[in-house]
Amino acid sequence: MSSHRVAITGFGAFCAAGRNASQVWQSLRDGRSGIGAWDGIPGLRMPVAARIQGYQPLEHVSERETDLLDLFAQFALIAAREAVKHSGIELTQSIQENGAVITGCAVGGKTTEDDGFVDLYRKDKSRLHPMVVPRTMANAAASIVATEFGLTGPSFNFATACASSNHALAHGYRMVRSGELEVAIVGGSEAPFSYGHLKAWEALRVVAPDTCRPFSQGRRGMVLGEGSGMLVLEPFEAAKARGATIYAEIVGAGMSADAHHITQPTVEGPSRAICAALRSAAIPPTAVGYINGHGTGTLANDATETAAIRTVFGDHADFIAVSSSKAVLGHTLGAAGALEAIATTMSLYEGVLPPNANYLAPDPDCDLDLILGMARPTDAEYALSNSFAFGGLNAVVAFRRV
Amino acid sequence: MPDTTLERVIRVIVKTQHYPPDKAALVTEEATFADLGIDSLDGINIVFALENEFDVSIPDEGAKTMKGVVDIVQGIDKLLSEKSAAS
């Protein structure tokens, strides 16, 4: 099969930090966090979250779509519509036949499921709404976006927890590169704010009570977020031929499994994923100028991620600028990799690296060249975006400035 | 006078499908699901809403044979009379 360069020609974003990609990028560049107090749920130890405050479905989707789609699929549809419009791609019959939607969604339609189970277990109702299954299934976003744009190629969803949409990006990249797809809408979405699901997160004791402070001393955990990010990938030459703006290229993707523990991360697993991404991109470690870290703000992740970066890059790690977007976006689980891919793309496109927000003081276990305070100008040519999932499934995507 | 079964069935269909007034006017006793563009998933949602409206349990077989408004009205009336006979 022929090998194509893979261009990013459009994207859309919808999350706490902004209602479109341009707003989200602005928030990231300014280090303005979408995390804040929320009305919460009585009895839940989760005072802060990255919620899409005041979300009114009918401002974004039709009444019928609110019936058919859980919040996570609504978010995906909103971001995908923006991404396709942004790309300016004309969906010809050939492109539709060789076009696909590849999504990440870790937990599926939790609010739908929760509401149904409240009816069943608490209200003693004898029947559940027939839409519970189609609204809950984690592939609903891929299905509705494929339907929306008439894309009939191989579409699917990855559910690899926090790495879901990086796995989606990796596979979309490979399928466009190989010539199997003429267009891939790749990304992810998540809507984890159901009482039952949040109680489960609370029990895991990884959620911060104050805010998300990646790589910082005094960090107390992750903060859950909701939303979606979607990107349009096309063969570079086709994008160029139609006069599209190419925001960045995806040049590689590396994946690995820790094969170690269901929650505890290792240094080796992420290191191998980063090395695999470099090999896939055929670049030496010294070519990398920026890493958009997984940076969840948990004690364990940020220290192991730092160690992984040091393991792979050695002394060159001192010359790689690092920031995590999760202080601004929250941890949007299945949407995280996609939103962070948009952040990485815009970083290279504008030559500006977003700061690592909510930082308090250095932690010796996170001795990276963190971008602190203001955004930093860059002439970096290559950047990586890391995602390391619970369960030790890692995916790293490599980007190149155009 | 209380609403007839037909009136209630029509109301359920219009509400479930979010029909605007012009489309709602097409939901008559003679209308079929095919006429109205109601697909199988819509049909299942309507059956669910009918069960709640009339507090009856519509068997799977009954749900599958409903092809239009008149089938629903007849089916519901039959279930309601069975229910009142049983009570």
Image (cartoon, grey):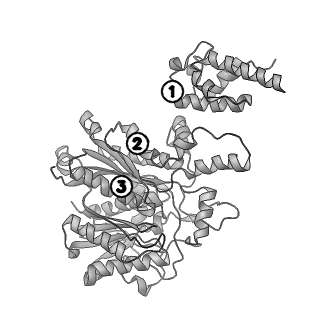
- Percent position of residue A370, x then y: 37, 78
Question: Residue at image x 51%, y 70%?
Answer: A222
- Label 1 Cα neighbours within 10 Å, binned few <14 / some 14-19 / many ≥20: few
Query: Looking at this rendering, what residue extends furthest in the top direction?
Result: B30
| Above or below for A353 versus B82 | below
Determine if residue A90 is in view: no
Determine if residue A196 is in view: yes
- The three-letter code of the residue at mark 3 reads Ala
Q: Is A376 displayed left or right of A141 in the figure?
A: left
In front of the other: label 3 or label 2? 3
Q: Residue B39: which numbered mark, if any?
A: 1
Q: Which one is in front, A106 or A193?
A: A106
In front of the other: label 2 or label 1? 1
Q: CA distance from mark 3 to mark 2?
A: 14 Å
- Percent position of residue B65, x then y: 58, 21
Q: CA distance from mark 2 to mark 1?
A: 20 Å
Earlier residue among tags 3 and 2: 2
- Percent position of residue A193, x then y: 58, 57
- Label 2 Cα neighbours within 10 Å, binned few <14 / some 14-19 / many ≥20: many
Question: Residue at image x 54%, y 57%?
Answer: A192
Q: Secondary structure at mark 3?
A: helix
- The three-letter code of the residue at mark 2 reads Val
Q: Is A43 displayed left or right of A395 in the figure?
A: right
- The three-letter code of the residue at mark 1 reads Asp
Q: Is A105 displayed left or right of A277 in the figure?
A: right
Q: Residue A168: which numbered mark, if any?
A: 3
Which chain does the numbered disc 3 sit on? A
